[in-house]
Amino acid sequence: MKKKELQQILEEGEGYRIEFKESLTNIDKEFVSFSNASGGKIFLGITDDRKIKGIKITNAYFHTAVTCALYKGIEKVDVLDRRDFNEDIINNIDGAMNFLKQYIPVRYEMTGTPRRKEIPEIPYDALREAVINAVAHRDYFEKGTNVMVEIFDDRIEITNFGGLPKGLKLEDFGKKSVLRNPNIADLLHRIEYIEKMGTGISKIRKLLKDAKLPPPKFEFGTFFTVIFTRPKIKTSIETPEDKIERFGIKFGIKFGIKNSRLKRIINIITMLHGEKIFSIADFAVKAGVTTRLIEKDIKFLKEQSVIEFRGSRKTGRYVLTEKGKKMIRETNV
């Protein structure tokens, strides 16, 4: 809209199809009012006396948050980790996927090349389709509800408020597409997150079938939930390195350590568990960080009595303490 057109609208003032709003408060009611009439336009950041004030739009107005949680066991009792992603829709989706990738176990297959093939417990693409579907079909007019991504020992649940979109019959679920939020769907389509062809559910089913996993479960009602069954961990194929890594993850959860620092600490513990000579300088080069950063990691592990320095300053070395060894042995398989 050109400046001259806006000035003309301001001079004419509000009318049957024109509404000025200073803020986003109760804007959902204005939408409903216009949709039940002949449509119209809402101009934000304009006072009733036609003065342009402008407005800062954040997700706080639109409850677009995605809440991710990791639970201990199979019930919502003990929360091991929780993240609330409340940025724009795209970053919320990506944040939820990063959370899932942090806690979903992976295995590796040799491909005949130097690079191994990473195979997650549940296909990332299937989980991504479910997260995108939840964000795209959530009922945003209902305040106080977030898209939920929840990890349990036996399953992963992805939930959005709103149930099936209006007009979509149960027998057509997964076959036809009804858009609850056309503007959000258009955005996701433009950036190639969705196809707007109702293929998302079919993709999830196929991805799980190809991975030889149980089919997804769907729950309908006030909320819509996709449930992924997690395969049971086979203890017979676990290696000592797997156990150390799982200990490291639990250690990270307990002390709020994550990302690159958690990876460094797991590597330090792995090296010491294998009784390898530990050189701070060499490890810093390998990790691509400064020695000062590695020294901080070492200091933290010493404070938790996981490692200690034995011997003289020149010839001694860091080793796992008996407490550290015991913590690894007692890591639940």
Image (cartoon, grey):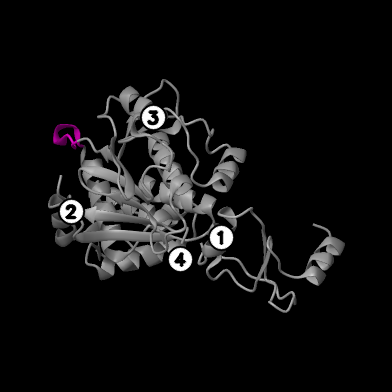
- Tag 3 secondary structure: helix
Q: Are marks 1 and 2 in contact (CB under 8 Å)?
A: no
Residue identified by numbered label 2: 75
Query: Which of 82 and 266 lies nearest the eye of the viewer?
Result: 82
Q: CA distance from mark 3 to mark 4?
A: 60 Å
Q: Amino acid at mark 2?
A: Glu
Q: Which residues, given as a range, are shown in magenta?
A: 232-238
**Precedes in sequence: disc 3 or disc 2:** 2
Q: Which mark is residue 33?
A: 1
294 vs 162: above or below? below
- Residue 21 place in picture, x, y as percent: 64, 71
300 vs 279: above or below? below
* Residue 313 visible to the viewer: no
Residue identified by numbered label 3: 172
Q: CA distance from mark 3 to mark 2?
A: 32 Å
Q: Assign the N terminus to one quadrant of the image.
A: bottom right
Q: Is residue 235 magenta?
A: yes
Characterize the local packing of mark 3: few (<14), some (14-19) or many (20 or more) Cα atoms within 10 angstroms. few
Q: Are marks 1 and 3 in contact (CB under 8 Å)?
A: no
Residue identified by numbered label 4: 292
**Precedes in sequence: disc 4 or disc 2:** 2
**Precedes in sequence: disc 1 or disc 3:** 1
- Residue 58 place in picture, x, y as percent: 56, 65
49 vs 226: above or below? below
Q: Amino acid at mark 3?
A: Asp
- Tag 2 secondary structure: loop
Characterize the local packing of mark 2: few (<14), some (14-19) or many (20 or more) Cα atoms within 10 angstroms. few
Q: CA distance from mark 4 to mark 2?
A: 42 Å
Q: CA distance from mark 1 to mark 2?
A: 42 Å
Q: Are marks 3 and 2 in contact (CB under 8 Å)?
A: no
- Residue 175 place in picture, x, y as percent: 42, 27
